[in-house]
Structures are given as C-alpha cells and as structure tokens.
Image (cartoon, rainbow, N blue to C red):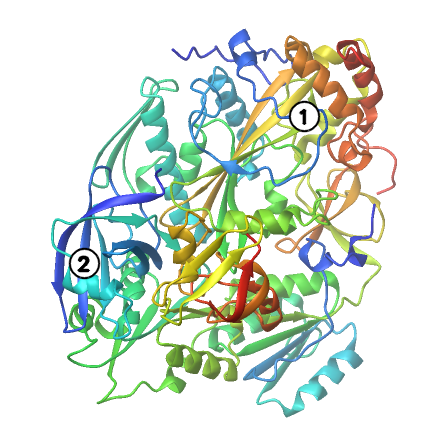
Amino acid sequence: MANSTASPHAPFKSVPYYPPMAINPDARCHLVISDGSDLPRTQALVSRLAQTPRVDSLVLGASDTPSLQRLLQVLAQWFAGLHVGVQLHVLGSEAFLWTIHAQATAHGLSNEEISLCSPTDAMQRLVYCVHCANVHSHPLADAVKCPACAVALEVREHFSRRLGAYLGVCRNADAPYSGLPA
Amino acid sequence: MNDVIQVRVHAALNITPVIREITFEPVDTALPAYSAGSHVQVHIPLAQRTLRNAYSLLNAPADRTAYRIAVRLQEHSRGGSRYLHENLKVGDVLNLSRPANLFPIHTLGRHHILIAGGIGITPFLAYSEHLLREGASFELHYAYRSGLTDAYVQPLAERLGDRLHAYDSLERPLNLAPILSNQPLGSHLYICGPQRLLASVREQASALGWPDGRIHWEAFSSAEPGLPFSVELAQSGRRIEVGADQSLLEALEANAVEIPNLCRGGVCGQCVTRYVKGDVTHRDHFLAANERADRLMPCVSRGCGSSLVLDL
Amino acid sequence: MTLILKPVETYRDDFTFSNSAHAIARFPFPFPEDQYRYSVNIEPATSRDPGSVFEHWFDIDEHYRSEMAERARVLEQDPRRYLVMPHMQTASWDALQMFMEHLSNDYPALFSLTRAGDQWHWRNHVLGIDQHFTFGDPGTLPCEPLEFITRQVQGDIALLDQRDNDLFMDAGMVTSPADWSLAFDAGMSFKQWHTPVPMAHELGVFDRALKYLLNIQVDKPVRRLNWTLTINPRMDTSPETFHEWGHDRSTVTAENAGALVHLRVELQFMARLPRSNGLMFSIRTYLISLNELVTNPVWATRLHRVLRDLPDPIADYKGMTRYRQPLLAWLSQFDPHA
C-alpha cells in the first residue's frame, strides 16, 4: 500500500500528520502534557515557552499525576477553570496523544488549540478491530492478530482521531482466524 | 424555475427614522425553513432594472409562515434601500432568492458571544431565538445610536434579560477587552456590523489568543457605485456596458449571463470569475492578493483604466 | 402506476432476493459510456422520468419490506450501525421531518402524516406503525428520532454537520454499506472519510465536490450514482462482517458469474437540512444479478467493456480483483466485438 504520509495531500487524509511544533505567541496560557517518555523534549518545550504569560505542565508518573486516570482527572479540573486563549501541547506515545486530544475536545478545545508533537513510539500503533470493536496496541506491521476476537487483520492506512486508532479488517476472508500468532 | 420564491408584503413599518422592518408572506406555498444566520436576496424592481440586495432573516427559524427583514436606508444607496423605504407598499408582490446561510452558528460552540453594531443586529435576532429554543449559553452585545439604529433594544431586553448588553455609542462605548477575556473554553465569537467594528474585534480577539476558527463575522457590504466601464467576454466575444450605479454582476445578469452568487457583497466567494486582462478595482473581502492577479468578484469589483476581458 | 410491494425476501443465507421485470426496467444503470472514469458526476436532483428511481427524493420500491426486515436484523446483531452525536439533535429532527413530508406526499397509499402545530401523527401502513408524537420532543417517540424514521426508509443515511468550511460524519444509520464502517468513520471530515478511495484525491475530485456540497441550498438537493460489485444479493457488505462474506469472492466461476455477481448501484442524494444547516446524505442501494442485467443487451455489452478496461487500483478498491477474469470471461459472450 502506498505510503500516504509521503503524499502532499497527507494533511487532508485521515492518517495523522504531526506538523513541526509551532507556538502561538498570542496564547494567554500554554499547557504542556507529557507521558514522560521523552522528558528532554518536554523540558526543552517548557523552556521555549518561558517568555509566554503562563505555562503549566503535567507529566505522567510525577507525584501529583502518578497514573493516567489521575492525570486525566487533574486535566479535567484545569480545563474547567480555563478560558479561550489556551494552547495545549501534548508529547508522548501516539495512544497518549489521542487520549489527551479526546479529553481536550470533550472540554471544548479545537484542533487549532491542540498541538500534538510527533509520537515517541513510532514502532507501535493502535489498531481498531472492526469486527469486535476493540482497540489494541500492536508493533508496526501490515498485519496483526486481534487479541480479543482472534481475526487476523490487515491494517489499513485509515485513521480515526476519535478512536485514536488505525482500521483493522480481516486480511483473508477464506481463513479469518489463521495465519498470524496472537 | 423555482430558484425564486414569490412573496407578498404583509407589513412594512418604520421602526426608527432609518430602519424599516418588512414582513413577507408566501403567495402560494409555505416558505422554506432555514437556519439562524441565513439571508435572502430581495429582487428590487427599480424602474430601469432589478437590483438584488441581501438581507438577513430576523424571525425564529422554525417559523415558515413569514419572513422578516430590516432595511437600513443607505445614504449612498444605488436605489435599493431607498425603494424599500419609500416605494414598497403592503400588498406588493416581490421575488426572493432561497435562503442561504453564510453565517451559521457553530454547532460545537459551548458558549456564544454575539457582537452587533447598528443594523448588524439582524442575524442575531434569529440567533437569539434559536439559542433560546436550544437552551444554549449565550450573550449579546449590541452597540447602537439611540433614536437611529436602536430598533430592537427594547424587545431584546424583554426577551433576553441579562444576556443582553446594550451600548449606546454616545453614552457607553463598547469596550471589547472585558468581553473577549475570561470566556470559557469552547466559546465562539460572532460579529456583525460595520467594517471597523469587525476589524477591531478580530484584531483584539487574536491578540488575546483566540484562534481564527472561533471568530465568525458577517460584513454588510454591498455593491457601491463607480465609473461606468465596459467589459468583453473572451469566449463569446460579446461586449457589455456596466453603468455607474450597476455592479458588474448585475450587468452580466442583465445580459443573461448567470453567475452563481450568494452574498452579493464581496464576501462569500461564489461569484469569483477569471479575467484574462485589464485593470480592476478589487472591492471584495475574499480573494488573496495573489489570487487577484487573474480573478475578481463581479458582485462588488469593477473595471478601471484599460479594457477588462473576462474568461467567460 | 400502483406500487406493488413484494413479501419479505432475504439478503443473506438462502438469498431469496430477486428483481421483477418492472424492477429490472427501472434499474439505475450507471454507465453513460463504454468507459468508466472518475468525475464529480453530481447533478441537481430534479424529479424526472415518472416511475423511475429519479422521480422522488426518497424512492420506495418493491423491496421495501425486505430491506426494512434486513435493517432490523443487522441492528439487532450490531447496534453500532446507528450513531448520533449530541450536537446532531436538530439535524435528526430535520431529517425526520424531511422523510415524513416527502414520503407521505409521494406515497400516500403507504404513509400518512397529519399535523396540528407540534402535535404530529405518523402512520406507516406497510409496517403497521401508528405514532402520535410531539415534534422536537424525543420522549414522545419509542426511540431517537433518527432511528425511528430510518427504520422505515430504504437506504443508508448519514447526517453531516457543516462547520469550519467542511462536512463531518456525525450521525447515521448504516446497515448496507459498500465496505465502509460508520463506527470507524464517525466524526471524520469529508476528506478523511474518503481517504480509502484511490486516485481521486490526486485528481482534486474531493476539493471540487466539497465546495459544491457546502453550498447546497434548502430544497435544492443534488444526486449522483456510484457503483461496485457484490457477490450474492447481500445488502450488508460492511467491514464489520467482511470475515463472514469476503470468501464469497472466491466462489465465482465463468459458469456461475451470472447468478452470483451483482451490480450494486448507489443513488446518493444530498439535501440541505433546513434548520440545522446540516446535510442529509442518503445512499439508496439497488442490486441486480448479472443474469437479470443481461436481459438488456445494451447494458450487457457496456458492462463488459467498462469492467475489462477498469484501471487496476479501482478494480482492487471495488474488491473484484479475485474474480475479475472469470467474470470477464462470462460477460464477453454478450459483447459482439469481444
């Protein structure tokens, strides 16, 4: 299958496109959310933002946000007290980026206000099994086996931001359950 | 041809010295439903020609028994607003274009901030009805001149209570900073009024970190007169004269050259037409500088200097 | 002419579905020439050819009972085929109103609607539904408004939200898709949900189509035809069930192609939803077996030439690569110049 990220049309297709980091100089508040997988990059970003009116950061695994659940709780509290003029920067695995993206849009942020930095786990991706509707993380490959329903899936170059996952569809309808180890 | 709706003037009322409210009722079938922010083009039968001016629909969008518009008398009118003020009578039958919406309410908005200057209140009358019906969170800021463009202050105050913030421009000028600061995440901003109000709200909102996608505006601009000029159609070789108080779009229509159009005020981009040579006075708010090298918007822009040749 | 509805036939298992001579005569054969090419083949959906599929906004035909039974069965097994995001409530009521007004007006023997203000009374004489409700109040219907009405109309329905100069797939009832998943595509923008379509992005097809759709006006709908092939008269060719039907493609031979292979034509219809400013996108699917299709010799010859000359990426996207050779072998007997 063609590598559509190389196409000039990539930003307009469903597969995610992570543009180079850009800082909105007019934002009144910057939030930096990281899953801790690339702390040097997180710290570099926070330093770059030092001149802006307000910077807050949350790092998964830190004392006040030890778990993803806790981090999402803290984030929800933040969002409730924030005003238009925010720029959110997210660093981490692709799964983490889209989890935070979903939480942010649920609180009214738009794509223009959310910057997703290129994922730290380029060799993994989430795959949505269209047959059983479960999402699992898999090593980067054209074909994977769904751990929930055991169908061997072809991973299509089609991505849902809402689910944060690529589309997985049965790769061989003559033998749906065979061909790949789980 | 069902591109136009025939309506009869049911009522026409001067609500200030410069604003006249006109209510249309259907001649035969019910009027099409529409969404808040929609406008219609009113086909105005002047003695020499028919003008088409765009006006926002005011009434609650669910109402299909009547359309209401409010017309401000324009000092530099080419005759359209003057006709609607001075010649139109109850019982007259007119044609309207079908409603179209170039200024819709953002469906994901969690709070809506409406800012109106003068007659720019019109789309927000329909907005208010829709948002009230939906139980949505909103606030309306209305700047006007009392005795001149304060047409809807009283009824809105009764309908909206403390959601309405009224500013008599002489008594209490509109101060934007407090309106644009401290608005909750997911807010959307809508502006309708004169160009300088639009420009100043957009500029201040951007400076406070508002992304472009949260800022929506509708300019009320329409074709303004200029010098007469002539235009040549490259494909047919025809030559068309454009009068001083006629737009290029109107001149084309008068010669049976129909071009898709919605706003007739240089904002929607529907009528963009290519030209192959000639000098143009661009008056639109749509085309980028580089696009103007070979494109123009005939609803407002005019030829000047060397002869204009359109790719039509 | 009186519309005669067939008793329920099946689109699965024993596949009892078939077309009457009348249904074959009105089948929307989609190829205007011997070669297929991508185009923005959108036209105003004006009523034409009384009795044809182009007469009414929402075509009801002899398969009505069968399609509604099939939809109910699919939903029972997989409720994710129906989805409405919270901001699509006004659009849902718009859609319900549009269907009820047109169906009761165009098929008064099958449907009736009486209204007194917001108090509506809807009757579907075929399915035996008699419902009083308050327009705009979901509590007065047995289920959500979009589900209520789309269980009573043929064709898949998507409601598109219009915002940010784009269209978003934010609600729908999709039980007979040609290999796309509402559950996966929900929330996507116009170009995002068209990502799997080969070649067309590069041709700028979607830029032009989007611009056109964004400007559709109230009461000025548009339509286009799309097509693919399906093995057996199977309505539910969704990715969700691909592991159950995909192997059908390996069963085609030069002998059985006429019975097994079906031309699947989608009459896509797009209308402005007046109060929400959304768009209704209805996808009305017509199936015809090639045995039925070749009773029209012009269609038979043309279909052979179109499929023979189709570019490989498109043939692959339409899922016919595995059986293209036996199919062409079978079709060539109807092409005098083959």
**Where is B63 relative to C281, above or below?**
below
Examine the image and state in which quarter residue A170 appears. top right
Where residue C35 sits: x, y (%)? 72, 28
Where residue A142 sits: x, y (%)? 84, 46
Examine the image and state in which quarter residue C119 appears. top left
A151 sits left or right of A71 in the view? right
Q: Secondary structure at mark 1?
A: loop
Residue corresponding to mark 1: C33
Is residue B53 visible to the viewer in this orientation of the structure? yes
**Which quarter of the rendered picture does the N terminus of chain B lie within?**
top left
Residue at screen point 32% across, 54% down: B40
Residue at screen point 83% across, 48% down: A2
User: In this view of the protein, which residue sits in the foreground, A71 or C23?
Assistant: C23
Q: Chain of mark 2?
A: B
* Residues at marks 2 and 1, CA–CA distance in whole angstroms: 52 Å
**Where is B95 relative to B144, above or below?**
above
Amino acid at the residue labelled 2: Ile
Residue at screen point 46% across, 67% down: B301
Q: Secondary structure at mark 2?
A: strand
* Label 2–label 1 contact, CB within 8 A: no
Amino acid at the residue labelled 1: Glu
Where residue B52 sits: x, y (%)? 32, 56
Find the residue positioned furthest to the bottom: A51
Where residue C222 sits: x, y (%)? 49, 38
A166 sits left or right of B94 in the view? right
C206 sits left or right of C71 in the view? right
Q: Classify mark 1: residues with Cα within 10 Å, few (<14), some (14-19) or many (20+).
A: few
Examine the image and state in which quarter residue B50 appears. bottom left
Q: Which mark is residue B22?
A: 2
Q: Classify mark 2: residues with Cα within 10 Å, few (<14), some (14-19) or many (20+).
A: many
